[in-house]
Image (spheres, rainbow, N blue to C red):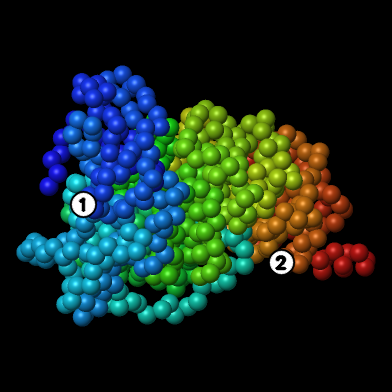
Amino acid sequence: MLHINRTFVAYLDEMDQLTVLVPKSCCPDEMAPFTMVAPSGEEIPLSVQQLEDLGDMVKYVCRFASAFEFGATYWVRARSGERTDVQIGAVVRTPAFDDQFFYEGKLGVDYTKEQTVFRVWAPTATAVNVKLIHPDSGDARYVPLERGERGVWSAVVPGDWERTYYTYVACINRVWREAVDPYATAVSINGEYGVIIDWEKTKLAPSARPLPPLTSPTDAIIYELSIRDFTSHPDSGAAHKGKYLGLSEANTSGPNGTSTGLSYLKELGVTHVQIMPFTDFAGVDERDPSASYNWGYNPLHLYAPEGSYATDPTDPYARIVELKQMIRTLHENGLRVVMDAVYNHVYDREQSSLEKLVPGYYFRYDAYGQPANGTGVGNDIASERRMARRWIVDSVIFWAKEYGINGFRFDLMGVHDIETMKVVRDALDAIDPSILVYGEGWDLPTPLAPEQKATMANAWKLPRIAYFNDRFRDTIKGSTFHLPSRGFALGDASGREQAKTVIAGSLRALGGLFCHPLQSLNYVECHDNHTFWDKMEVANGYESEAIRRKRQKLATAIVLLAQGIPFLHSGQEFYRTKGGDGNSYQAPDEVNWIDWEQKSRYENDVRYVQGLIALRRAHGAFRLATEAEVLRHFEFLEPTPPSVIAYWLRDVAVYGPWGDIIVIHHHEEKSETIVLPDQEEWDVVCDGEQSGTIPLRRVRHVVDLDGIGTWVLVRTEAMNADENAG
């Protein structure tokens, strides 16, 4: 064996380029020129292309003419006779490496009773074993894998290995590293091992009731919740508090008989439930879930469910089957499920399976060779690399097909590249075009060219993907990051023109951000930052609780009636508070849970929001799908007082039961009279106290606004025809 003297190091940084670093204490002049020794023993000359003084070290950039054989060990020999092994370096981040090793075949584990097939992508490894661990005794057996095409290692292991734990142990840069399979679809407690399971045993009978059709993304009404938060309150009425099964329980109730959980979701009338991360995450010990809390944005394994939501986290089947039961139950109740997908970073880069199996490949690095941190959590997934992109797309396909997921909310989507998001959208279209794709389009400082980022500025390049519209949020509510700031709903008229733009769908033709309204996800509150109620404690704390409740109802009405896709945070409809905590990601349950006692106190306000949801669902004019439709039918009524935004949806009988609709939002606690655009009669179906599809009263020529609130007036074509005939 060659003697290693680590007085200097060598890295393969391009397919034909080595970087050699020699400490000045080793007399660099006596070491150059260098020779590379191939596994066959062939000596390959190295031509120094660049020499750089790094202070206490000298850097040599050398080129060579031979093809480099990955999966074998090369050496660099100095003129002095000293040697070092060639470490696989920045070459893994080159397009040439991507092209040479991109693999399209199967990855992961295929189980049958007769044998299990293992496949893992580790192109820079020189040896890989699969470690098979008995779940009870802990006894381990190592089986060597064979290197195949494009850096994929595989083995067929005879026998029945169901419920066996496994990891991969790979030798890379002469160091052995143990890693969980990045494609592991089942894991042991706390995600310590992959687990071999029989997927046939997880299959459930299909839902007895088909989901109602979803013609356009603007038909969606999304309701964000956490599995744990939604049922963990002592008065939730759920037997399985904080669990997958808790969200599957029917006919639960809380204080004063108030509906809770699944029953409440169905009663409210939303179409989609966006569920905060339920892929396996760090931050909660699955052996004792109640001892700590975490939202779940610490991803460990992106193909396996979280165990703390299962009744038995030690059973790899329990989390899978119970999650499937939850999703099927939601489907049977007419609710689609959106998965909060966290593909932009991992919990711990150095300890992640991705880094252990292909060091340096899956993550972005800055100009100085340091891990990028656009996500703010220490690492950014390099989605633009072909196998990283494939890992994301394969995961999305897996969740859509195996679990029946109906939508994907991409956390920090602006960190991803446009091409990856296009491939995601195309892959889901092949399964079901009604599957929603949307995300956070923030422009974060990750080292990706601006024109490649899936940000809101590039929304025109992704016309079938929606974005959380922070301009809508901050215009209606006020700045999320400056609590005293007040938007239109909080009584500030200075952003009224911007508010009109976002209410009309934030269309580019109107000075907005998007090609079509289906790209605008409209919201004023989500799990991040302060709740709307807690912000008002600061921004409008001088007002009475009754006035602030009116303001929150106004903001929610704006969300639900604006063009685009409405998004509600669970509990928003009954003034959810986190006690002023603006980042409750690891705060106790008492801060994060849904307070069903509070919901029981505000039943009338909940009914108001329920009525707004029914109103939106009753007429397609609130849900226009294209820019052309909005421009044809949407007209602002002016002049109106600065405290009022009023608009007319004209000639919209083709979309629903009314031929014309007027919506009026008023943000001051004083009376105003608004002149209507004609002398005809209009039915009021929504005012500051009541909402729905049943007329409350009839007005002609004018409507009186008696304070803060929303008014919706409708008129059918039949009424117009009768009146014209008279």
Q: In which quarter of the image is residue 278?
A: bottom left
Estimate the spatial distance between the alpha carbons at disc 2 and disc 1, rounded to whole Å: 64 Å
Residue displayed at 72% across by 54% down: 627
Question: Is 165 drawn above or below residue 226 in the view shown?
Answer: below
Residue displayed at 63% across by 31% down: 492
Q: What element carries label 2?
A: loop
579 to the left or right of 438 = left
Viewer-closest of 521 and 614: 521
> Is residue 13 at least partly visible in the picture?
no
Q: Furthest residue to the right?
A: 726
Residue displayed at 21% across by 80% down: 113
Q: Where is residue 664 in the image (x, y as percent from the top left)?
A: 71, 46
Residue displayed at 50% across by 76% down: 210
Viewer-closest of 706 and 334: 334
Q: Where is residue 19 in the image (x, y as percent from the top left)?
A: 33, 35
The amino acid marked with disc number 1 is Cys
Sequence-wise first label, 2 or 1: 1
Q: Position of residue 142 (x, y in %)?
A: 13, 63
Q: Where is residue 694 in the image (x, y as percent from the top left)?
A: 66, 63
Q: Mark 1 points at which residue?
A: 171
Q: Name the residue under label 2.
A: 656
The amino acid marked with disc number 2 is Gly
Specify few, some or many for label 2: CA neighbours under 10 Å numbering under 14, 14-19, or 20 or more: some
Q: In which quarter of the image is residue 543?
A: top right
> Is residue 445 at least partly visible in the picture?
yes
Q: In the image, which disc is placed on residue 610?
A: none
